[in-house]
């Protein structure tokens, strides 16, 4: 556990270095932030205000010391603390990510099970062909098509925004209102497609592997019902890879909702990231990336704990040491 | 074969002309090709043969658990005179694990690795009877005690990987016994175990089925196991029974050349220092078997008539008990050879 924690700290440190210097290398934010008509003095003052007149290693040192006390700096463009900006946008992204994972799980596991149990049926072949599309069609194109069909042609669902939100535990959420749902459905579906395809294939492969095991045959010989065999004996065995993937993909979905959020103008973190990159707003970019890394570390931890719950052969101590 | 025994009841299990095939790329594989046998209540039958002789498939066919694309294409399996093929899936499921239980070869693979022993035992009870979990648990515990497992309460809470191979096979046997079935089909359950554990489990199984009056079909390739365990033996070759009868009769005076060869291949039967006896040639491919006796290519006693399939019939030694062999030119009785 301790080793795990140190590794994570190391990863965070390296990431902060890479992003900090990477963004510096891209360009000078002052060129974008300052009014094009400003004179040399104004520019110099702006540079000094943002602390960009100091040498890079000093800038990094300042960033690092204040980061350790929980301050990741203020946005260059708005002056609001970067973390605050991100946390404002986070609920929207989390909601979108959770909705898309829910769609992927609720549809993916049953479809994968079906395809695994009846691999030769026409429906199973249809499911598998569909999953290939889910893998290979680019997200942005599918997003555009969804808007085209459901918003433009059919006019069923709104193409952009979050819709009506309700405050739940101090956070604005969409999924409690009908209007919010209608706004959520298209972007969540768009984001879910890849993971839906992934879960279908994963579940199908796991099912086919488990179904030929002796313990399934033994369960049959005990006279158990099909629902018991599939619902308990098969599902519990294939849950281990599924939980891993769901965990990791949940992280990815949050981190890379960028494309979907841009297309559907969903006011989440991904949209914030794109805007920040356009303005070379370094504190926000760095804070975003570090937050995402932290999130991946935490998700991995949760996945390990779930493992030991699902698979009695894995003890938590081993899992901490082995990875 | 008589349809009824002395008490007027049909025998517990009747297998008549059972044919189980597996379609393969190279043709139809007739894994079981017309197997007949009868089993009375409480009787122990040894089903002996090499790998690929169809003995395990016979066991799975009785339970209706042949893996697709394999399927039963002929014959009947009657339990208490009822043809199992006429029952619907629900009724067949009610028989599996309740009236006919099965034990598998590899105890490392038969228990589900992610479920606790108690879960796997309790579900075997509740699948067939509407009893409470506590009561099912008591039954499971009693079954564990029955198969000689110490500290049963602790074992119930264990996962399979925490138990040794011998222990797991005992658990599998306990699961088979928990519903007090009329018949247990044991598919080489001791093959994967240490020799010492093998002996223990054999002895215990024999005691348990004798005590409870459970009939037992013991599938094995090991004649020495059958010698000490079974009442009757069926020797299988290439999907057919080639010799069947009381175990002492068949093993002391085999009439089919294949049985003879099998017995001679047991190393203990060979005088020390001589090369071990073996049956020449290989088991024939079970796909597209030529007509006639499948063993004739390897048989030292083959005659011209062997291109016709001999029937499983008494070889004309009625004094030797109800024994039958599938051979035109049977091995002479020992008295005649000396």
Image (tube, rainbow, N blue to C red):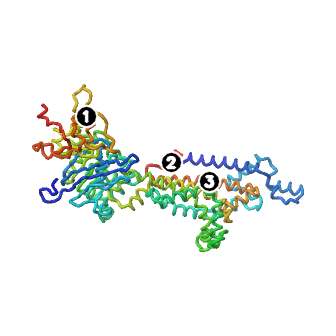
In x, y percent, where is residue A3?
56, 45
The chain carrying label 1 is B
Question: Quick one: A165 or A121, which is closer to the camera?
Answer: A121
How much space separates mark 2 and mark 3, taking CA atoms?
19 Å
Assign a secondary structure to mark 1: helix
Residue A170 seen: no
Question: Quick one: A277 or A208, which is closer to the camera?
Answer: A208
Are discs 2 and 3 both within one chain? yes
Q: Cβ–Cβ below 8 Å for labels 2 and 1?
A: no
In x, y percent, where is residue A266?
66, 65
In x, y percent, where is residue B43?
19, 51
Label 1 belongs to which residue? B265
* Between marks 3 and 1 in the image, the one whose residue lies nearer the viewer: 1
Query: For the C terminus of chain B, which image quadrant?
Result: top left
How much space separates mark 2 and mark 1, taking CA atoms?
50 Å
Q: Is residue B181 above or below residue B293?
A: below
Label 2 belongs to which residue? A319
Q: Residues within 10 Å of mark 3 (few under 14, many from 20)?
A: some
Assign a secondary structure to mark 3: helix
The chain carrying label 3 is A
**Residue B132: quarter of image:** bottom left
Label 3 belongs to which residue? A294
Assign a secondary structure to mark 2: helix
Q: Which residue is depicted at the point 77% across and 47% down?
A: A56
How much space separates mark 3 and mark 1, taking CA atoms?
67 Å
Are discs 2 and 1 both within one chain? no
């Amino acid at each position: 556990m301790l080793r795990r924690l140190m590794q994570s700290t190391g990863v965070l440190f390296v990431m902060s270095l890479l992003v900090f210097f990477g963004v510096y290398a891209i360009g000078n934010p002052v060129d974008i932030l300052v009014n094009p008509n400003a004179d040399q003095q104004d520019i110099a003052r702006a540079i000094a205000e943002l602390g960009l007149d100091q040498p890079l290693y000093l800038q990094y040192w300042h960033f690092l010391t204040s980061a350790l006390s929980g301050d990741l700096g203020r946005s260059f463009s708005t002056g609001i603390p970067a973390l605050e900006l991100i946390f404002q946008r986070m609920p929207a992204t989390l909601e979108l990510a959770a909705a898309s994972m829910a769609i992927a799980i609720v549809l993916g596991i049953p479809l994968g099970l079906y395809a695994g149990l009846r691999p030769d049926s026409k429906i199973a072949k249809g499911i598998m062909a569909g999953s290939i599309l889910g893998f290979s069609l680019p997200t942005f194109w599918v997003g555009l098509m969804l808007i085209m069909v459901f918003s433009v042609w059919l006019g069923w669902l709104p193409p952009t925004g979050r819709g009506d939100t309700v405050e739940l535990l101090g956070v604005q959420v969409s999924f409690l209102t009908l209007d919010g749902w209608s706004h959520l459905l298209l972007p969540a579906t768009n984001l879910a497609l890849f993971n839906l395809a992934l879960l279908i294939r994963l579940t199908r492969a796991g099912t086919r592997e488990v179904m030929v095991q002796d313990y399934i045959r033994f369960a049959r010989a005990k006279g158990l019902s099909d629902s018991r065999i599939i619902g308990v004996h098969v599902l519990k065995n294939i849950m281990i890879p599924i939980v891993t993937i769901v965990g990791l993909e949940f992280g990815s979905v949050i981190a890379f909702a960028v494309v979907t959020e841009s297309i559907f103008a969903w006011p989440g973190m991904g949209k914030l990231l794109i805007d920040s990159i356009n303005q070379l707003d370094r504190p926000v970019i760095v804070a975003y990336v570090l937050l995402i890394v932290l999130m991946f570390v935490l998700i991995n931890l949760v996945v390990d704990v779930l493992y030991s719950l699902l698979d009695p052969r894995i003890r938590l101590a081993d899992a901490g040491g082995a990875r | 074969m008589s349809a009824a025994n002395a008490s007027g009841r049909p025998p517990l299990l009747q297998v008549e002309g059972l044919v189980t095939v597996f379609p393969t790329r190279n043709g139809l594989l007739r894994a079981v090709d017309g197997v007949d046998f009868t089993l009375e209540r409480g009787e122990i039958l040894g089903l002996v043969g090499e790998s690929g002789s169809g003995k395990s498939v016979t066991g799975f066919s009785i339970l209706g658990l042949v893996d697709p694309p394999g399927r039963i294409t002929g014959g009947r399996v009657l339990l208490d005179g009822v043809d199992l093929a006429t029952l619907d899936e629900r009724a067949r499921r009610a028989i599996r694990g309740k009236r006919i239980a099965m034990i598998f070869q590899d105890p490392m693979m038969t228990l589900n690795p992610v479920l606790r022993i108690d879960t796997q035992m309790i579900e075997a009870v509740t699948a067939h009877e509407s009893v409470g979990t506590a009561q099912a648990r008591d039954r499971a515990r009693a079954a564990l005690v029955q198969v000689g497992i110490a500290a049963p309460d602790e074992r119930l809470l264990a996962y399979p990987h925490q138990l040794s191979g011998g222990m797991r096979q005992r658990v599998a046997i306990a699961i088979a016994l928990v519903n007090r079935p009329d018949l247990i089909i044991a598919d080489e359950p001791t093959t994967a175990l240490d020799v010492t554990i093998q002996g223990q489990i054999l002895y215990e199984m024999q005691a348990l089925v004798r005590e409870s009056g459970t009939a037992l079909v013991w599938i094995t390739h090991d004649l020495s196991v059958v010698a000490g365990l079974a009442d009757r033996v069926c020797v299988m070759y290439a999907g057919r029974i080639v010799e069947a009868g009381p175990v002492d009769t068949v093993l002391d005076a085999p009439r089919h050349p294949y049985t003879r060869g099998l017995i001679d291949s047991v190393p203990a039967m060979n005088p020390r220092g001589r090369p071990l006896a073996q049956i020449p040639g290989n088991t024939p491919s079970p796909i597209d078997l030529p007509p006639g006796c499948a063993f004739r290519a390897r048989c030292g006693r083959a005659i011209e008539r062997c291109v016709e399939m001999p029937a499983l019939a008494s070889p004309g030694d009625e004094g030797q008990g109800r024994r039958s062999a599938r051979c035109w030119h049977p091995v002479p009785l020992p008295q005649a050879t000396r």
